[in-house]
Image: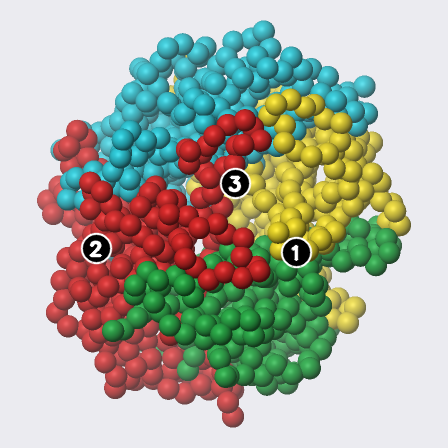
Chain colours: A red, B green, C yellow, D cyan
Amino acid sequence: LKVLNCEYGKNTIKFLRLHREGKKHFVKEVEVCTHLRLTSAHEYLDGNNSLVIPTDTIKNIVLVLAKKNGIPTLEQFAIDICKHFMTTFCQVAYVKTYVQEVPWQRLHENGVPHIHSFICVPDGIRFCEAEQCRNGPLVVFAGIKDLKLMKTTQSGFEGFYKNEHTTLPERHDRILCGELFCKWSYGECKDFDFDCIWNKIRECILEAFSGPPDCGEYSPSYQKTVNSIQMLVLSKVSQVIETVLNNTFYNVVDMKNLGLTNDKEVSKCSKHNLPRLFRNTQP
Amino acid sequence: LKVLNCEYGKNTIKFLRLHREGKKHFVKEVEVCTHLRLTSAHEYLDGNNSLVIPTDTIKNIVLVLAKKNGIPTLEQFAIDICKHFMTTFCQVAYVKTYVQEVPWQRLHENGVPHIHSFICVPDGIRFCEAEQCRNGPLVVFAGIKDLKLMKTTQSGFEGFYKNEHTTLPERHDRILCGELFCKWSYGECKDFDFDCIWNKIRECILEAFSGPPDCGEYSPSYQKTVNSIQMLVLSKVSQVIETVLNNTFYNVVDMKNLGLTNDKEVSKCSKHNLPRLFRNTQP
Amino acid sequence: LKVLNCEYGKNTIKFLRLHREGKKHFVKEVEVCTHLRLTSAHEYLDGNNSLVIPTDTIKNIVLVLAKKNGIPTLEQFAIDICKHFMTTFCQVAYVKTYVQEVPWQRLHENGVPHIHSFICVPDGIRFCEAEQCRNGPLVVFAGIKDLKLMKTTQSGFEGFYKNEHTTLPERHDRILCGELFCKWSYGECKDFDFDCIWNKIRECILEAFSGPPDCGEYSPSYQKTVNSIQMLVLSKVSQVIETVLNNTFYNVVDMKNLGLTNDKEVSKCSKHNLPRLFRNTQP
Amino acid sequence: LKVLNCEYGKNTIKFLRLHREGKKHFVKEVEVCTHLRLTSAHEYLDGNNSLVIPTDTIKNIVLVLAKKNGIPTLEQFAIDICKHFMTTFCQVAYVKTYVQEVPWQRLHENGVPHIHSFICVPDGIRFCEAEQCRNGPLVVFAGIKDLKLMKTTQSGFEGFYKNEHTTLPERHDRILCGELFCKWSYGECKDFDFDCIWNKIRECILEAFSGPPDCGEYSPSYQKTVNSIQMLVLSKVSQVIETVLNNTFYNVVDMKNLGLTNDKEVSKCSKHNLPRLFRNTQP
């Protein structure tokens, strides 16, 4: 008898972990999802729940681990969760954990860091995943999402394929703008400095997108820029899983019939959000 | 040299197709996404765009097909799009199309259908996908999403696994509520009556969730209910790809310290939306 | 010393009220907001909280009233809440309550109503407000929002004012589509049949928007249609507070350069959501 | 004959204004809404559109003004728009304009500002409004919204009013967290340095919320903190229109039944978004 989806779990276990060093406070607010697959599927077939770990218990375990271990890095926390489920429950065949950070930053007043006040600055969200099959390796992924970037020149799109359905004009100077999602793999879990690597990769992405600060670098297409980003990220980690630059088009407003020449000074954007169900798949 | 993600395309081509029969109007508003992979990847590696079909052209083609063929069913329209790209462009190695419907329904006044007025009724969104690799079969998927269902009794969760992290009480009478996502496959594209099957599957889902109208049917767990839904859907099509009942918990409000006995009359829901990046994977 | 905003309260007290008649279940899920202003403002000026009713207590009271009285109608429930605060707390100078319904509808299987299963059908959200100043009347408002309507003909816009910034062509046959928000006043709280009136007003709105089912009625502008809606609503209640038809424009896609004549068969919509902070004000 | 709402306009005119100084680029992306009321209401009553300025023309005018004048400050741009409508169209009785900024910031690489690359950093959104009645003064408002702040100590709530519905415990050390909205008036339009004042007010708000960086300042209630913010803002401008700290509650997770003592290290937040239709009103 075939059993279909038998993965289940708890989504969006959202909490704040406060760490104090004397009067100085440190916060990490995270959203955690933990999914399991069990070795048997009696709960699906027979309604026998005897091996089912309730999602409420999953939530409790995540909170207990945060309390006991803290959240040294998102990745280490995801690893801790996976290890706990594999070690504690022999009925778990597979565990996957996703951790996403709420981007709190320490507040500064005239350059002085505040000991317990924070501001939310969502300029790219950090996340990670860890997963493990019983008897398999624990694999760790990390990434950045919702990072919105724009360059107002040094971008074009020319020499593309044309036929009777082509109406796009060639352009050698356009605005390039998009929301970046990038996910990479650390492969099997070793002793990485996850914070350091993540920060370096974020810098790589900004650099690959924008080029040198004094002149930029010409992008002949979205595709080429995505590949430049991927190549630079690959120089830091073993594998890039997915890179999407969900582009926002800016069209120069035609003002001829309003009696004006618009030298790319006024553009309208047409934002199209990527629908939930339709993501890139691997080649 | 490894090339990573080389799928690209146009997301959210949103338009309305109006069809007239005399004075009677019929509308179909859809959001279409069409993605491609090309046989080579020069645009990623060298910035050579000569084989790239611009996303603007992809959009034009989708609109032209809607104009020429209409949208007899969502699925047929997705098939038309895939076939067009495979037939027209020899540089296309893979094509995938997603089509989602805006749920317009004909307005009725005192039971009389209006000839040209419509109301939006989002009680479950219909979508489909079609995909094809060069020299491979054209495969069609369909589904329903954002279908919110609730039963206020005939649901429990007992006899589950317990350890020191368990705080959930056993319950044999609780509210079961969730947002359903279900996607199935028609396998290789044949001559299906897509509208008829979709409507039957929707009925199956409602039936499997709620049981007979006069008494309902006891659900011993989310898992069992999800499986019942899947089994009933499987009786209509060859394969169920994914079923998620993204559950919303309702907790009976404890009113003891307010001097009242709450016989499950007042409940609070804790809604946790499934994050974008974390979906079930296949067993 | 001037005290500025001194209104406070609890937003989004969301809960489900279950009512049972034998084996038949009835549900009302609502979101309630209750705001207060106190007779003094010591808590703002001096940090003296002695008269402050905590928002947690406000939430408890709303839940207790739902438990004790049920929710006969949204409006009666809002009235009950306002009366409770005015009667119980002499420090309350002003109370306002907003109640919004989650649109659960009883599920039907082959026309048979289910005794305890429901489906969410958001085709226009019902809400109400009640407010009272100490020694003033209790005033009740109600409304509908997020009601999306479309007519595919019998709408135009001609003979408007023109100058050098006009580029809009005149049109006598266009699509009219919008999301309706309408709020009215019952004046001082009397013995209204709130459910009956609300349903009649919803019908009025649909009728005023779409005209007779067999032919429709020509709309020469959004403005005229909004006014027709208002006039018909006014025939049922003493006062219309606000009517907004947040229109969605559909532009016929120009397919000339694609070699096709598009007889209004394919249109693209440009949806612009009303921003939160910018609502109509009264004349 | 009474005419009800007769305000209309164009919402969300979203565009990017690019300004170049040699190779250095400056961007301002804004969303503009402009509403009008006309001196007569024939379009509502009779469907006579002869004085109606189409919303499409309104959009054109906003774009033309951006092209001609640039956007020196948001406020000056809103003033320009209002003045244009009052001066050009004698049928306009009232004009209101809202302008909101997309928070692009110049990208920096190793501290070096990039000449044409930008990153979106939404840590508080700047907006403004201008409005004018014919023969009345042009009044200018500005504000900040979506500014999320948190302090992890130096906040409590004690000594509040208690009765049989009170279950909230007194707390002298809790987390204070909220999303701030603050809107002020510049009164009649004079020669203000809008950028400078806005930045100073933002600093005031952060300061009033968090207190000195080395020790903070005790907040005895949300109310007192809101008032402190208002008082400090008032020291810079003539009038504060509205201040809302839409608070997010963090509750310390009770871990006793999990065998642990939680010294405020793990908290769960319960976020309740302010519904659209229910905003504070003025005392």
Judge the density around disc 3: few (<14), some (14-19), many (≥20) Cα neighbours within 10 Å: some
Q: Answer with left or right where residue B253 lies relative to residue A25.
A: right
- Residue denoted by label 2: A204
Tell us which disc is closer to us: 1 or 3: 1
Q: Is residue D136 above or below residue B140?
A: above
Could you tell me which secondary element the residue under label 3 belongs to? loop
Q: Nearer the viewer, residue D91 or C132?
A: D91
- Report the amino acid beneath label 1: Gly
**Within the image, what quadrant is residue C144 found in?**
top right
- The image shows residue C275 at horizontal and vertical percentages of 52, 36
- Label 3: which residue? D275
Disc tally is 3
Residues at marks 2 and 3, CA–CA distance in whole angstroms: 40 Å
Same chain assignment for discs 2 and 1: no
Q: Name the residue beneath numbered marker 1.
A: C259
- The amino acid marked with disc number 2 is Cys
Q: Position of residue D248 (x, y in %)?
A: 38, 43
Residue visible at 29% across and 42% down in the picture: D117
Report whether mark 2 lies on the same chain as mark 3.
no
Question: Which amino acid lies under the numbered mark 3 shown in the image of this protein?
Answer: Pro
Q: Residue furthest bottom?
A: A1
**For the residues marked 1 and 3, what is the alpha-carbon distance in whole angstroms?**
48 Å
C125 left or right, relative to A192: right
Residue A117: percent from left, percent from top: 23, 38
- For mark 1, name the chain: C
**Which residue occupies 17% across, 60% down?**
A197
